[in-house]
Image: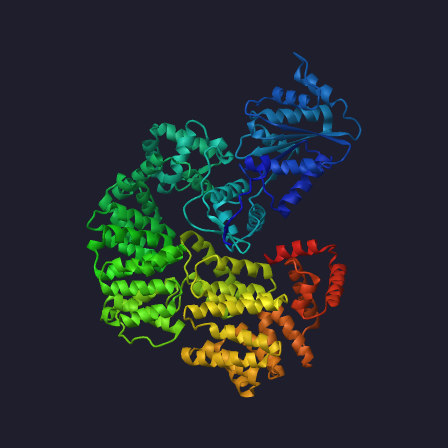
Amino acid sequence: MPETAPRRTPQGADIARGDGTGAPSSDREELITRVLDVCAGRSAAPLVLITGPAGIGRSRVLAQIRARLTDPRVSAVDIRLSRGERDFPGLVARLAAELGEPPARGEPTAAVLRRLLAPLTGHRRLVVFVDDAQRLAPDCLPAVTSALGALAGSRVTVVCAVRTPTAVAGLEQLRARGLVHEERLRPLPVSAVEHLLTALLGARPAPGLAAELRDACRGVPALVHAAVEGYLVTGQLRVVDRWAHLVDTGGPRLPVTHPVFADLREPVTWPVVKALSVLHPLGEAAPALIAATTGLREDEVFDALHTLRASGVITHRNGWRFRAPMLATLLSGCLGPYERRRSAQLAATAIWAGTAVCPDGDYLAERIADAGRLVDPERAAAELLARGAAAPEDVRAVRWRWVACGLLDTAQRPAALHRHAVLCARHQQWAPAAEAADVALRDHHDSLDADSLQELQIIAVGGLAASANVAALRGFASSGWRSVPGGAANRIVTRAAALCLLNRWSDARDELLAGHGSWHGDGTASAAFGQAIAEAAVAVAGGTAPVAARSARSESARALLRALGLDHSADDQSLTGRAVRAALSGQWDRSLELARSAIAGASVHGDPPGQTAMLREMATILAARGQLNRARAVLADARSRHLLLPHRLAVPEAELARTTGAHQQSRTILEQALTAAAENGILAGTDELLLRLAEAESRCGNHAAARRCADRIERIADRLGTAEAHRSRLLARVLVERSAEAAAEVVELAAERDRPFEFAATVTAVAECGFADQRLLRAAYEAFGDLGALIPRARLRLLMRARNVPVPGRNATVAENERLLATLIAEGLTNAQVATVLGTSEKSVEGRLTRFFQRTGYRSRAEIAIATLRSCA
């Protein structure tokens, strides 16, 4: 985690032909039932038409009807037409061949039919399935219907899959005579697209993804399949915590030989439709531009456009436009480099000249970026920079600004690179930020002032951390910093930032204090960064930060440091910061959604080292809900990264071990985290580690060891002065001293902080020491319930019963116990492990499982696991 979604080959010819969907649909089930009734003779209509646009799933529905036609009195024949089979005699010849009675040389078509249909007597029936019937001549189907009706009455039904729009001559007369039963396949709803994505990717689509793809593909299954394939090719589909996310790194790509393009690859329509994929937003100006870029005459372009319109690919409404936007997106990926640049040049030039207009303001920026130096470089760079600065959070803006930097002359390029690097970094797009910073520092350091150099150097070391290039970061902190341009202030401050990013917080603090006279100056970038980094280091390692006046550069510096996770002086509006705040405020589902999005995006743009708190909260939520394997996966992913303050992950990791009864492993995790923190002079977060150790020692009866932990917590809380450390101090006093005063104070503190899980956990800890009253226990129980924290709520329930505190909602409790039991079984826990988690006996778990099997009808643990995973994904 995160992973690129597995590349699953679309299933069989259905999908290759653009007809496949594994999505259940009540509409389609009802359609199949109605057609089966006709085939069974419950209707007099000899002709059934299953219609719909290309890729809607006609072939699959035809195959499903065929598979369900199991009546032994009904014979069925399948005919899939090739492009050359168009007339009535040819169709009859194919039918005869399929029935094993090929026509004799010169045998009349009518005689062949009489011979073939002669065995149909009594209740025997024949159903002929014809796929791609739009390839027949326009008058062929009416001829077939009339002939079969005359020869065999109601004993023959022809079921045809017909792509629309297609003209069928004589169809109105057949309808008027009641000889046609017609079914039109409707586009997939969002729910069906969601099911289809889940089947293809082995993960549920993130909120909004199914709706986005449904709209882009207009509910056409073949286009959904093609889009998924294209996004997999470009690595844009990322699976995080069993949810699929689409990250924006450009459009999907498919080879030109992909079946979704099969009907478009005609000599004239292919170049026209490819050019239109880029130029269609220009409305009525598009055809002339298509002619210019393809070298075709305008009348040839219009002929191709009308052909595409007749086949349902495009529409002529407010210009020539694609019926399904996704098809345009996929086609644009088929353009060669010159085709792309040339069409972009023509589009940009036309808009600048006023001969074409596009209401989408970003369209011009995209075309300018594609055209590069084929258009006026000075004007192109100015427009790209302006558009990129107006929407810095837009992923496309990264490309616009980067292209602009390449178009500028040498004098203007350094400032543009600097601005681009800063904007990318502030929005946690660390890979492009570091790339721009490296180019500016390497090629243009002589043209930049000390303040700009300072920002670029912070971004450069931030890029090393985001790319987990720890060796380079260590090399810089060891000796590379000495060659930093911009003077002593820049060198000291940049080295301090690198030390923090290596988790050497006390070294960073000491570096800044020792060199205070060099970097401490009014209004400089070095002063702003130095002050912010010093405060961050002191907050982590203790001590006293130098006092400096805030300047206009302070907020700019802190914004960059917040993006790295080195400053917490204001609300972090990134996905990471919002995910943490949502978790703490009790919005757990929202927090998980934001965290998954942040992880998916970071997998493309570089992992900010400051995601530790988010990953910690994510693991805590999943573990509390009983999803232990998912919590372990989050922690394993976190351990594989380069993160700030990684010792803070030890608490949920140790809790996971304790939950399943691995108490010694839990203790080892805490002790190792404390050792690592001490080696780097870190105090922040160690109070909580010591509190967990004190709890473990107390449970084992090692009261002296618990007391030593509590004494250390006292000293740490005094040095840090934070609310978190004070909470640990109070809980340690409750645990070791059985202090009623501390118990009351810590509960009051937890209530004031308005963090539901922290409050409920605090009440539970206090209650275990004998201090919480019934009112507090019920409040904590409700808080755990609102969060869906199944495991701590189950433990609190046992505690309440032990204290004779009534547990509300007996039926709800039974259902919740079953839900937790199913979740733990799905996680692969043994009965003994489940008993440990639930605080009961293994025999009790066996009894619960037996009753659960009897009530639900499940026959094995595997069935429980499959059902639970589907509902909890």
Residue at coordinates 32% horizontally, 56% vertically from top-left?
460
Residue 523: x and y in percent read: 23, 69
Q: Give residue 764's position: percent from left, percent from top.
A: 59, 77
Residue 583 drawn at (x, y percent): 50, 67
Left or right for 531, reference 734? left
Q: Is residue 657 above or below residue 413?
A: below
Residue 110 lies left or right of residue 265; in this view the side is right
Picture quadrant of residue 277 = top left
User: Is residue 486 found left or right of 855 in the rendered image?
Assistant: left
**Residue 62 image-quadrant placement:** top right
Which quadrant: the C terminus?
A: bottom right
Q: Residue furthest right?
A: 122
Give the residue at the far bottom of this rendering. Answer: 741
| Residue name at image x 32 percent, y 46 percent | 364
* Total residue callouts: 0
Colour scheme in use = rainbow
Query: Could one spot residue 387 in this view of the protein?
Result: no
Q: Is residue 119 placed above or below 673 in the rendered structure?
A: above
Q: Residue furthest top?
A: 106
What residue sits 60% from the left and 33% below the top? Answer: 161
Using the image as rendered, state which of residue 610 and residue 250 is in the foreground: 610
Residue 744 visible somewhere in the drawing: yes
- Looking at the image, residue 729 lies above or below residue 784: below
Residue in the picture at 49% in, 43% down: 227
Residue 379 image offset from top left, x and y in percent: 23, 46
Q: Nearer the viewer, residue 282 or 800?
A: 800
Say if 7 sits above or below 303 in the image.
Answer: below
In this rendering, position of residue 345 left or right of residue 249: left
